[in-house]
Image: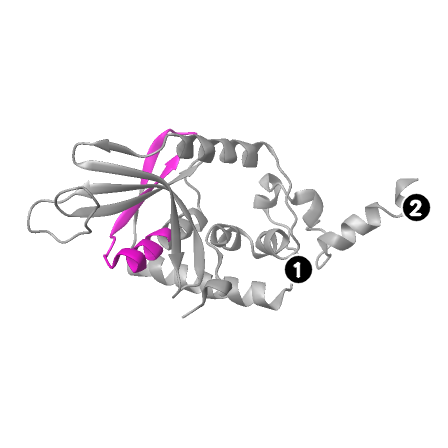
Amino acid sequence: MFTEDDLRPLSALQHLVFCERQCALIHIEQVWVENRYTAEGKLLHERADELGGDSRGDLRIARALPLRSLRLGLSGRADVVEYQRLPAGEEGVALPGRAGRWRPFPVEYKRGKPKLHRADEVQLCAQALCLEEMLAVEIASGALYYGRRRRRHPVAFDATLRQLTEVAARRLHEMLGAGVTPAAVREAKCDKCSLLDVCLPAAAGSSAQAYVDRLLTPEAIV
């Protein structure tokens, strides 16, 4: 079990699964650069948060919900958690001021479309694992809402995805604890990364800080 001081950002799992070097640049070297994709994603999250909570019959909606798992050593928040009222007799969680039992269903907002890699699914699964620990309930599935397609992509939290998420959480603690940025590897996905000009994947092993320092030398300025 981790302590409160050991918690790492849940959102870093998405960076890690997409690219360990990107994750290290952001969370070890504290480098961040906006581009169109990150700006659109940020705007989508802000719009989801601004809508606030809502109730629609047998559906209760919570937004920007704080999350934490001492077992995985993660903290963050969920864009949306829907609580669906269950038929009488089924197990679920109790909600203050609401009759019956409810099933949590996390929904994460993303700007683009479903991807070939599983980074988004791992981030969503980590949210579900946090909720399971916080609420002492099993969560079978959730959804990713992609802004480009404007529809949900269902995600089942099966054994394979759960294991991938737990392995990613352990790797995140290992890498951030070591404080070492992995060497760069040039791949097709680099073209859409906002950190491309800082990462310099053609110069494997370079430090983002060293790159910035070189840019600020008198020779470079001249």
Asked if the magenta segment contains residue 87, the reply would be: no
Figure check: 84 above or below 74: above
Asked if the magenta segment contains residue 150, the reply would be: yes
| Residue 112 visible | no
Q: Residue at x 59, y 54 (%)?
A: 27
Closer mark to the observer between disc 1 and disc 2: 2
82 left or right of 51?
Answer: left
Please state the extent of the stretch shown in magenta in the rendering: 127-153
The picture places residue 64, in percent across and down from the top left corner, at 39, 41
Figure check: 213 above or below 221: below
First along the sequence among labels 1 and 2 = 1
The picture places residue 170, in percent across and down from the top left corner, at 46, 66
- Dot 2 falls on a residue whose secondary structure is helix
Q: Nearer the viewer, residue 215 or 201?
A: 215
Residue at mark 2: 219
What amino acid is labelled 2 in the image? Glu
- Mark 2, residues whose alpha carbon is within 10 Å: few (<14), some, or many (≥20)? few
What amino acid is labelled 1 in the image? Ala
Q: Residue at x 62, y 37 (%)?
A: 34
Residue at mark 1: 183
- The reply to whether dot 1 and dot 2 touch (C-beta < 8 Å) is no
131 left or right of 205?
Answer: left
Q: Residue at x 44, y 58 (%)?
A: 74
